Image (cartoon, rainbow, N blue to C red):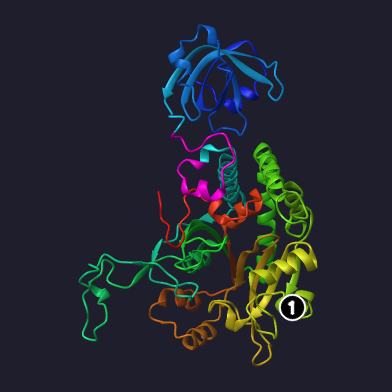
Amino acid sequence: MKHTKVKDLLNSTTTLQEVNAKGWVRTFRNNQFIALNDGSTINNIQCVVDFENTPEEILKRITTGAAVSVIGTLVESKGAGQKYEIQVNKLEILGDSDAEKFPMQPKKHSLEFLRENAHLRVRTNAFGAIMRVRSVLSYAVHKYFQDKGFVYVNTPIITGADAEGAGEMFQVTSLPLDNLPKNEEGNIDFKKDFFGKHTNLTVSGQLEGETFAMALGQIYTFGPTFRAENSNTSRHLAEFWMIEPEVAFNDLDDNMDLAEDFIQYVIKYALDNCKDDLKFLEGRLLEEEKSKPQAERSEMALLEKLNFVLENNFKRVSYTEAIDILRDSTPNKKKKFQYIIEEWGADLQSEHERYLVEKHFKCPVILYDYPANIKAFYMRLNDNTEPGRETVRAMDILFPGIGEIVGGSEREERYDVLVEKMKALEIDEEELYWYLDTRRFGSATHAGFGLGFERLVLFVTGMTNIRDVIPFPRTPGSAEF
């Protein structure tokens, strides 16, 4: 008999039918009531066992974590909390679970404990919900761009280009580390390496994405990216997923419009398609915040916060205006910020971004026109800026609880200006000849942005640590599983 998903059984419109359900035991009470979950929904289905006619050796094997198959009649439930239950006629243990050794017992576990058991944590309600929301958001990303006629491009994971210019990249090599070949200058001879040159894991697919946008018009990437930044904060991962659209003929204003529309679309899609999971995560967040001081608690519940982003236009503020606001702010004057804002040109930290969003404007904020010297070489230099206060057509979208969720810009399409910027930053023109070719042949205004997918999932689920929204987190000192 073919089994039916628990989600479909709970949404059934007919009862008194014989059904087969397969899943894992969450709890087993009074030798009679199995709470069965198969991962299709956060909700369990109650399976009522005829314990008087079930062998004792079978009852003993119905433990938390055990995989079971039940065949029985779907009936309206007499108990509170569920619409239907299964009156079990036949029960089979598919896989035993030692109750004394199984880590995911039905009790509250710390998030740190669950991270140490990342291969099993998805069997808890919270992580099952998070990963289903992640899956739906992932689908919504593709649906948004595909519906708008964007072309999905797979940019390389192994690359010789450092798009960000920060140098925090993982090297890729097949050279013997205990006997590295050297050239005449005494440096490592990468010509003898697998690719014949120095290569890394990508930090962004943007540069390669631009080459496709200049032929296909509008493209997007959605793939893994890597940063060898030795950071143990709750917002950083060494391996994460990035969404990067790139659109020919778009300027900075078009770019801001696209980013805002995109974010609102995927959040609405999650709200429409993950109601049970988001409701559960909202309750989990409320419970967690009870232990925090009032000042540290969220001003809005999770669903209210998500709807707030949908119902409010993002506030667009220039970097210069933001610096003035921050310089005059109470936490800056009272030296409550860890990084005090003293002058124009300062690189904004997460605490500054969150102040603007959560305290000052109280809505999502798009900052634009940043100082050129704190942004990447490929961003378009603004015309008519003061000497010493040159700005670029950059934009960052700031969200409550997170800070920066999107970074993007109008790209520098002028060949001579781009070359000058690369020379000033000592970026090898020969290494990026292919990137410069897009400015040599048929150059045009274009713009794009990058959105760290895990930060989006973090915001939508209400979690506070980015390690809890990716299946297997990769962080400094940790590459388990």
What residue is rendered at 44% in x and 82% in y? Answer: 427
Coordinates of residue 295 in the picture (x, y in percent): 76, 60
Which of the 4 quarters of the picture holds residue 130?
top right
Dominant secondary-structure state across the stretch colored magenta: loop
Vertical placement of residue 22 versus 406, above or below: above
Residue receiving disc 1:
332
Residue that sits furthest to the front in the current view: 100
Q: Is residue 91 left or right of residue 76?
A: left
Q: Total number of numbered labels? A: 1
Vertical placement of residue 447 versus 146, above or below: below
Vertical placement of residue 94 versus 218, above or below: above
What residue is rendered at 54% in x and 33% in y? Answer: 39
Is residue 430 in view? yes
Residues rendered magenta in the picture? 101-121
Coordinates of residue 282 in the picture (x, y in percent): 70, 44
Is residue 253 in view? no
Q: Is residue 117 magenta?
A: yes
What residue is rendered at 46% in x and 26% in y? Answer: 67
Vertical placement of residue 343 versus 44, above or below: below
For disc 1, the neighbor class at 10 Å (few under 14, some 14 to 19, many from 20) is some
Q: Is residue 195 magenta?
A: no
* Front one among 376 and 143: 376
Helix or strand or loop: what does disc 1 sit on? Answer: helix
Which of the 4 quarters of the picture holds residue 13?
top right
Residue that sits furthest to the top in the current view: 53
Q: Is residue 185 left or right of residue 436?
A: left
Q: Is residue 295 left or right of residue 107?
A: right
> Type of residue at label 1?
Asn
* Front one among 209 and 68: 68
Coordinates of residue 60 in the picture (x, y in percent): 46, 19
